[in-house]
Amino acid sequence: MTNAIEIKNLNKKYKDFQLKDVNFKVPRGSIVGFIGENGAGKTTTIKAMLNLVKRDEGTIEMLGMDTLKDEKKIKESVGVVMDGCNFHDNLKTGDISKMLNSIYKNWNTQLFQNYLKKFILPENKIIKEFSRGMKMKLQIAVALSHEPELLILDEATSGLDPIVREEILDVFMEFIQDEKHAILISSHITSDLDKIADYIVFIHQGEILLDEEKETLLSKMGILKCGEEDFRKLESDEYIRYRKNQFSFEVLVNDKVAIRKKYPDAVVDGVTIEQIMLFYVRGEK
Amino acid sequence: MKGLILKDLLNLKSTFKMLGLMIFLFAVIYIPQGNGFIFGMIILMVSMMVVTTISYDDLAKWDAYALTMPVTRKEIVLSKYLVMALLNTLGAVLALIVGIIGSMIMGQSFSTEVLAIIGVLYLIAFSYGSMMVPLIYRFGTEKARLMLILSALIPTGLILLVTQMQIPLPEAANPLIYFFLLLGFTVIMVFVSFFISLRIYSNKEF
């Protein structure tokens, strides 16, 4: 399986923040959820991939090409949605189609029209009068209408109501049916990723903490609830992080099956991506 | 590239309508007075619209988004200079039309003096724009606007000073020499400005 995105040793230093040796891959045919709290480095990583900021070190390949050498060629086949609407307030959808028709070689006016219909976006209104959900749907329609192979979505679902979000997730699932396609989706709405992601890449303070198949993560990790006495009995390699409550300990464990076996009386629950994130960021080692 | 220029023109659509109305009003007021001031107003108003397009882009955070498309930074900068050239030319043509219609209404023949004024203003619009664009890319529209007002005051002040001190201006035998000097100066300004803008823009991080 080839990779749609391959990032190696990406480094970027700012005064008060840095990306440290970021490595990860987005295999074709899969959806990778890129998670982390605000300011963890998700957007900076995505901007470095698109050459919106200059990296200090590292190589980035997209669709098998180097992003510095073949930038223009790559961008013909990549659709990007950023947090917010980037079209000017006074334009209408027809204006956007006209303009992008002469920017993208593969702009497909018919496809764009179909998406507008599907998303019920009005053709005679200016963008300024669009609701936030409509603006986001417009951006996604645009990102899909030049027939890209790769979608990069930076917080594309945040700030939307659950119904619109599900509509959009359905479109992504449809897009990924083609095995050449791939999606990198950064989000802090982890429930969306619970639904659609194949892999989870977790970034924290500019470093990748976790890069794993989602199913493996969810089937292996678990949360052990116990008292202090039992917690002290755990070996340090049996858990990842713990959080202390008033009366009990909550422990994120590597392998819930093994723990259940070893401590048959213990309560070990399954885990969601949100809980994993919380444990990593707020829990103690 | 064509798409980028189209984007600016589409964005200015509503501004154009307003501008047409303003030009009409100015023409009604100033033409009967036989005042050359109106040509300056028209060219200035139209040529300043390139600044409007840049502030629209800023408002929409367009540039970062445009760079996710198959568009290079060089093309973005070049498109702005082409839009500037288009707008300046449009301004000059509009001024010319107003001049011709004005002289027809007033029952005068169209004087070459008007043609000369428009030609000179056309070139000055390019020089002014060439100063403006790199300043905007470096400092943002709001600060650059202030700087430009200041920078317009300097030459005005100098001219006032020269006339106050009654230094005799050199008189060339042929006024065309001035025109060609200005033309040369403008062409150099535009080229230098473009390369400065490109440099600033290439190092920009979004």
Image (tube, coloured by chain):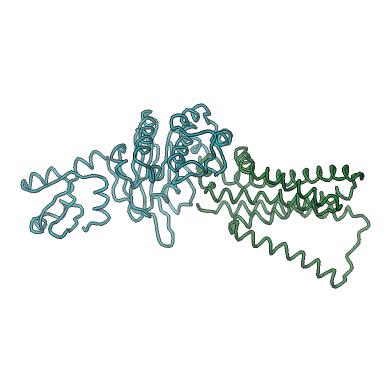
Chain colours: A cyan, B green
Where does residue B165 sit, x and y in percent of width and height? 85, 73
Position in image of residue A221 (x %, y %): 19, 45
Residue most extreme to the bottom: B165
Residue lying at 19% horizontally and 56% vertically, measured from the top left: A243
A259 left or right of B26? left
Answer yes or no: is residue B82 visible: no
Q: Is residue B125 visible?
A: yes
Residue nearest the observer in this picture, A277 or A6: A277
The image shows residue B168, relative to residue A56, as above or below, that is below
Image quadrant assignment for residue A150: top left
Residue located 54% across and 44% down the image: A89
Residue A162 occupies quadrant: top left
Judge from the rendering whether residue A229 lies leftward or rightward of residue B154; answer left or right: left
The quarter in which the N terminus of chain A is drawn is: top left
Q: Percent from the top left, x then y, of residue B108?
A: 92, 45
Q: Residue at x 5, y 47 (%)?
A: A265
State whether residue A193 is above or below residue B200: above
Residue in the foreground of this view, choosing between A284 and A170: A170
Q: Is residue A101 left or right of residue B28?
A: left
Q: Residue B133 at what x, y percent from top left? A: 65, 53
